[in-house]
Amino acid sequence: MIRVQLSDNQRRKLENYRRQASSRDSEKALMVLMNAEGKSVPQIATLLKRHPHTVRDWIKRYIAYGIKGLKREFSPGRPNEKRKKLIEYIEIILSDPPTMHGYQENAWTVPLITHAAKRDLNIEVSKDTVLRALKDMGYTYKRPAKTVPGTAPSPEEKRTAIRQIVDEIKELLKRKDCEIYALDESHFSTEPYLVQGWFKKRWPPQDPDTLQARKSHILWLFESYDTKILLEKIQAI
């Protein structure tokens, strides 16, 4: 029968590790603590709803390697060359946007990294493996956020630019050669292109208020010689 003997210092370290570790690693530390308190492997397995072999293996690993033996990334055998290669690859590709590696997406995701690793490293790797590697490397998932570039003009600079454009339009209107085109004359639209794709039938559902919620676009083009000014006004109905 396995029985762990813990000193006060070892017990304190295990309890601290249990509070700070992930849920799985915390459970492993709990197995050791429960065994040190006198509970047998079958009793621990019943309480934690784990197989006795699993409980016994983790207790043995603690006896042999200490707390580091309970960590998920710890491997007492030969280093995993595929995992090492994957981590090195992830470090490289995450320094660039996906567009530089032949993808259309702007942010890296686990499926995207998995596909890239299979393609470039010619190794079989699962999404779970990539996810574990990212977490072990200290990465965390965040939604891409829209940010204003550091080189963007200040609010006052924007107002000044608008005033200059307005003054320029006033000067253009004084010219006899100034041509003004409305939206239906210029055949220009800022609406997005239609794309093909798979959608559920009758989706999105028809809303009787849809037309009322739309916004009208008023587009004007001022043109004189080599000067063209395009203005768009979006007006809520």
Image (cartoon, rainbow, N blue to C red):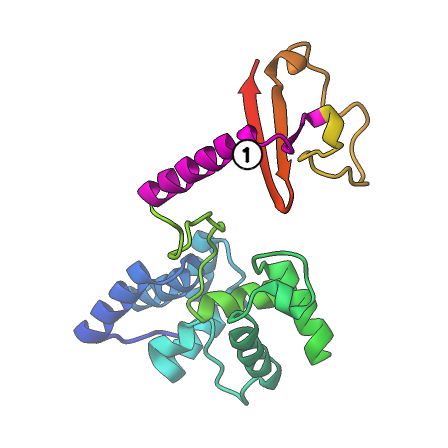
Q: Is residue 217 magenta?
A: no
Prevalent SS, magenta region? helix
Q: Nearer the viewer, residue 21 or 92?
A: 92
Q: Is residue 169 magenta?
A: yes
- Judge from the rendering whether residue 106 lies leftward or rightward of residue 162; answer left or right: right
Residue 145 at x, y = what percent? Answer: 46, 48
Instruction: Place residue 195 in its image quadrant.
Output: top right
**Quarter in which the N terminus is drawn:** bottom left
Q: Label 1 is placed on what type of residue?
A: Leu
Q: With respect to residue 196, does 144 lie above or below?
A: below
Where disc 1 sits, the SS reads: helix
Q: For the residue carrying disc 1, how many other residues have a C-alpha within 10 Å: few (<14), some (14-19), or many (20+)?
A: many
Residue position for label 1: 172
Instruction: Place residue 40 in its image quadrant.
Output: bottom left
Name the residue: 40% across, 52% down: 152
Residue 74 at x, y = what percent? Answer: 45, 78
Q: With respect to residue 103, does 157 lie above or below?
A: above
Q: Nearer the viewer, residue 132 or 174?
A: 174
Q: With respect to residue 219, does 211 lie above or below?
A: above
**Quarter in which the C terminus is drawn:** top right
Stretch of the chain drawn in magenta: 155-183
Residue 224 at x, y = what percent? Answer: 63, 39
- Judge from the rendering whether residue 12 lies leftward or rightward of residue 178; answer left or right: left
Q: Nearer the viewer, residue 112 or 71?
A: 112
Q: Nearer the viewer, residue 5 or 171?
A: 171
Q: Residue furthest left?
A: 8
Query: Is residue 206 among the parts visible in the rendering?
Result: yes
Q: Residue furthest bottom?
A: 78
- Judge from the rendering whether residue 200 lies leftward or rightward of residue 91; answer left or right: right
